[in-house]
Amino acid sequence: MRVIQFGLGPIGNKLTKFLLERNNIEIVGAVDCDPAKIGKDIGELAGLGRKTGVVVRASMQEVLREKSADIVVLTTSSQLVKIMDQIKEIIESGMDLVSTCEELSYPWLTHPEISREIDRLAKEKGVTVLATGINPGFVMDFLPAAMTGVCRDVEKIVVERIQDAQFRRVPFQKKIGAGLTVEQFNQRVAEGSLRHVGLTESMQMIASKIGWEIEKKEEVIQPILARQTFTTKDLYIEAGNVLGVEQIGRCYVKGEEKITLIFRAALGLPDPVDRVMIKGDPDVELAIKGGIYGDTATCAMVLNAIPVILASSPGLKTMVDCMPVSFFT
């Protein structure tokens, strides 16, 4: 399976290691717009201590003049609008696509026109497009949807993702607002630059799979504050400042709250867990103590989705449309 990596940031570089571990996958090219990365070997960027012979190019066309590929792994942005041109270029090149873009995980309701265009182009070119990851892509959407398979009836679904972010990379800690004052936190929320992207998409994915017609949805974001001084090797947070974020998404069907997604990520948060609770016939509950480590699991999901995508019918897919993704040797 010949792969082109598009985007060599923290997730892309980690994914390089995962891809190179499989002897039935060959990385044939890499693309990034960062001038500091162009011309460098992906092994160097990934911290492997060795060269792979694959150097970063500035564009897809440069790679394709030298090599052909089956699929492109796109790890550049969470926002669909920002990567639309990249998606179109990949589709036009006739290659399947798997992405970590959260908004692409279920874009049919939030970006209906873009979704239809991607689906149309993909079907015309005979390629498959899928976005996946750990959240969205698994914990808060695919997993609860799959768990309802043992239910005669489902009244409500609640998912909690509780993360202790003190051991995550600094960009993630800053993404959840760690170290900000309350005023700075609220300003960034108002600007739309501080939020976990994907709760809306996850709610819509679950509802579409079950057949619930959403009449109203809402998201509430608030800071988790330090009760006392908190320090890490990179951050010093005074009491009263922000340790992280709590974001709750709610989905209503016929006046009833049917889906509740609770995302908490903060430095030093006790008892991290991923928990799915289904109220129905029967009630079902699953708790993954310690939670699933996001960066590793995201890269694994993307890697393990590759053969699933290559075997899928053309078009824009979601995780509830495809065959189940599993580890493969």
Image (tube, rainbow, N blue to C red):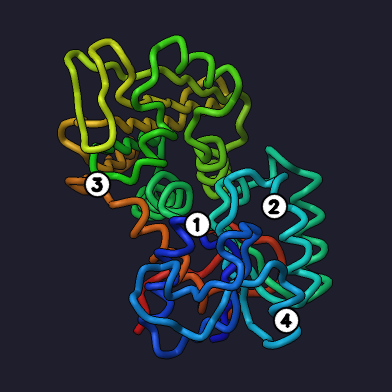
Q: Earlier in the sequence, mark 3 or mark 4?
A: 4
Q: Earlier in the sequence, mark 2 or mark 3?
A: 2
The relative height of residue 127 versus residue 33 in the rendered view (above or below) is: below
Label 3 Cα crowd, 10 Å radius (few <14 / some 14-19 / many 20+): some
Q: Which residue is mark 1?
A: 9
Q: Which residue is mark 3?
A: 291
User: Which amino acid, by three-letter code, is at mark 4?
Assistant: Leu
Structural distance between the alpha carbons of marks 3 and 1: 24 Å
Structural distance between the alpha carbons of marks 4 and 1: 21 Å
SS at badge 2: helix
Between tags 3 and 1, which lies in front? 1
Residue 235: image location, x then y, percent: 28, 30
Structural distance between the alpha carbons of marks 2 and 4: 19 Å
Q: Earlier in the sequence, mark 3 or mark 1?
A: 1
Residue 290: image location, x then y, percent: 19, 46
Q: Which residue is mark 4?
A: 64
- Residue 139 — which label? none
SS at badge 4: helix
Structural distance between the alpha carbons of marks 3 and 4: 40 Å
Q: Residue at x 38, y 73 (%)?
A: 18
Residue 170: image location, x then y, percent: 35, 41
Report the side of 126 relative to 134 (left or right).
Answer: right
Structural distance between the alpha carbons of marks 2 and 1: 15 Å
Label 2 Cα crowd, 10 Å radius (few <14 / some 14-19 / many 20+): some
Quadrant into which the C terminus falls? bottom left
Front-most of 324 and 103? 103
Q: Residue at x 71, y 74 (%)?
A: 127
Between tags 2 and 4, which lies in front? 4
Q: Earlier in the sequence, mark 2 or mark 4?
A: 4
Q: Which residue is mark 2?
A: 83
